[in-house]
């Protein structure tokens, strides 16, 4: 978590160092965007000794929205996050689980055009589904076998983010940012840190 905070602080530092070269050109209108990057699951559950956990995954997000003013926009997006996994092995058994998340978000973003051109803050809500595949394998005393199960849960959560957007032209811009997804799929202990770069096209 400390590393995530340092990366977020670094992103803000880069944005502040380059604002002098940014003159926000975007006006009212519709736009679409694509973001991709690295996600880190922050799952607050207790694990027994010997558990191997993989919490880093890729993430992609498609979005579309409307820019009401040079400062304010509303956007809806669809996102998918790669798998987090847990594995525990002992003398007689092996337990493994993989979980994936997909869902939609609705966000509002505010650009600090007059103070820090290009820097924006966003917040919103999410509706997501968490799908988990569990497999239990056992062997010993002349017996062996396996059991597999899939379960899913859907629910709402929220997000907060900070980023920087640079206009390449009046219709195309690039961006980089950090977003914290809280309570994904309604799980109060399932959060994700998303570091992304993206491209936006305005109509």
Image: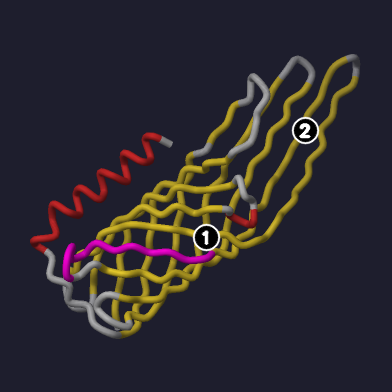
Q: Quadrant of the C terminus?
A: bottom left
Indicate the quadrant where residue 18 lies: bottom left
User: Along the line of sight, which residue is nearer the eye, 28 or 140?
Assistant: 28
The answer to whether residue 79 is above or below residue 170 is above
Q: Which residue shows up at 60% across the image and 50% down it? A: 100
Quick one: SS at disc 1?
strand
Q: Which residue is mark 2?
A: 136
Q: Which residue corresponds to the image point at 64% horizontal and 20% vertical from the top-left?
A: 50
Residue 76 picture location, percent across and down: 47, 73
x and y, in percent, of residue 157 in the image: 57, 59
Work out which residue is located at the far left of the displayed protein and give it.
Answer: 20
Instruction: Tell me the element at label 2.
Output: strand
The image quarter in which residue 21 lies = bottom left
Q: Position of residue 44 (x, y in %)?
A: 59, 38
Q: Which residues are the magenta region?
A: 114-125
- Left or right: where does residue 7 sit relative to residue 140? left
Is there a contact, CB below 8 Å, between mark 2 and mark 1?
A: no
Crowding at mark 2 (Cα within 10 Å: few <14, some 14-19, many 20+): some
Taking the magenta stretch, the answer to whether it contains residue 116 is yes
Q: Which residue is mark 1?
A: 158
- 75 relative to 82, above or below: below
Q: CA distance from mark 2 to mark 1?
A: 33 Å
Relative to 101, is 149 on the left or the right?
A: right
Comes first in the chain, label 2 or label 1: 2
């Amino acid at each position: 978590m400390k590393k995530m905070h340092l990366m977020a602080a670094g992103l803000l530092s880069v944005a502040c160092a380059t604002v002098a070269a940014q003159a926000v050109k975007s006006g009212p209108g519709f736009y679409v965007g694509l973001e991709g990057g690295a996600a880190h699951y922050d799952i607050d559950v207790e694990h027994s000794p010997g558990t191997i956990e993989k919490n880093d995954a890729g993430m992609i997000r498609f979005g579309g929205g409307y820019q009401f003013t040079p400062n304010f926009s509303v956007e809806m997006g669809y996102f998918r996050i790669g798998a987090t996994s847990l594995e525990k092995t002992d003398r007689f058994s092996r337990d493994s689980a993989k979980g994936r998340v997909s869902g939609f978000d609705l966000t509002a973003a505010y650009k600090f055009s007059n103070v820090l051109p290009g820097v924006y803050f966003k917040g919103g809500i999410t509706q997501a589904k968490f799908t988990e595949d569990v497999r239990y394998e056992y062997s010993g005393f002349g017996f062996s076998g396996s059991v597999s199960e899939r379960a899913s849960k859907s629910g709402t959560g929220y997000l907060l983010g900070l980023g920087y957007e640079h206009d390449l032209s009046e219709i195309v811009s690039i961006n980089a940012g950090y977003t914290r997804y809280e309570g994904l799929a309604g799980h109060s202990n399932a959060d994700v840190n998303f570091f992304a770069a993206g491209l936006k096209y305005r109509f």
